[in-house]
Image (cartoon, rainbow, N blue to C red):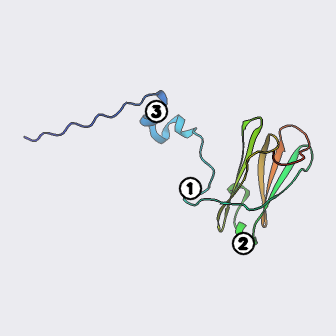
Amino acid sequence: PTSAAPAAPRAAPQTALERDLTNKGKNSYYYAHAPRDAETPDAAAPATPVSGYAWDDRDENEARVYISFEEDELAGVAAADVVARVDAASWRDVSLDVVVPTTRGPRRLRVPRLYDKCAATVSVKRAKVVVRLRKAEPAAWPQLTW
């Protein structure tokens, strides 16, 4: 008679979160609501840093960041394709991260310490990406970063 080797015991999940993810996989509530890493549109292609940008303190409610590209680099790129994220770890640690999928691969602009809290929206115009920073509190920004 043949005897089957006993199956190796699986480690039981420790928490309700782990149990739910193990039992339901991608259908889990926690999987569906987990934060996604939106740093690069294509994780296989690392983003090249943007070498320069311009900015402008439009008024007390808005500042803008301008990122220029070659004419052909933004072919077919829409505002929805650009990832612009403002992270506020603390009241003094507010950063801007913009990833633009270009015809030459993804490009990234990181501004590690913005002057103050804000929200970002993006528009794409010919060879330029414009990031509008809606200020949390109306005030003049004498500089973009600390």
Kindly identify which residue carries mark 2: 72
- Residue drawn at x 78%, y 67% as measured from the top left: 127
| As drawn, 29 above or below 46 | above
Which circle, 2 or 1, is nearer the viewer? 1
| Image quadrant in which the C terminus is located | top right
Number of other residues with Cα within 10 Å of mark 1, as a class: few under 14, some 14 to 19, many 20 or more: few
N-term-proximal mark, 3 vs 2 = 3
Badge 2 vs badge 1, beta-carbon distance below 8 Å: no
| As drawn, 97 above or below 103 | above
| Image quadrant in which the N terminus is located | top left
Of residues 67 and 74, the one drawn nearer to the viewer in this rendering = 67
Number of other residues with Cα within 10 Å of mark 3, as a class: few under 14, some 14 to 19, many 20 or more: some
The image position of residue 7, as x and y in percent, is: 24, 37
Q: Is residue 62 left or right of residue 113?
A: right
Kindly identify which residue carries mark 1: 43
Where disc 1 sits, the SS reads loop
| As drawn, 129 above or below 13 | below
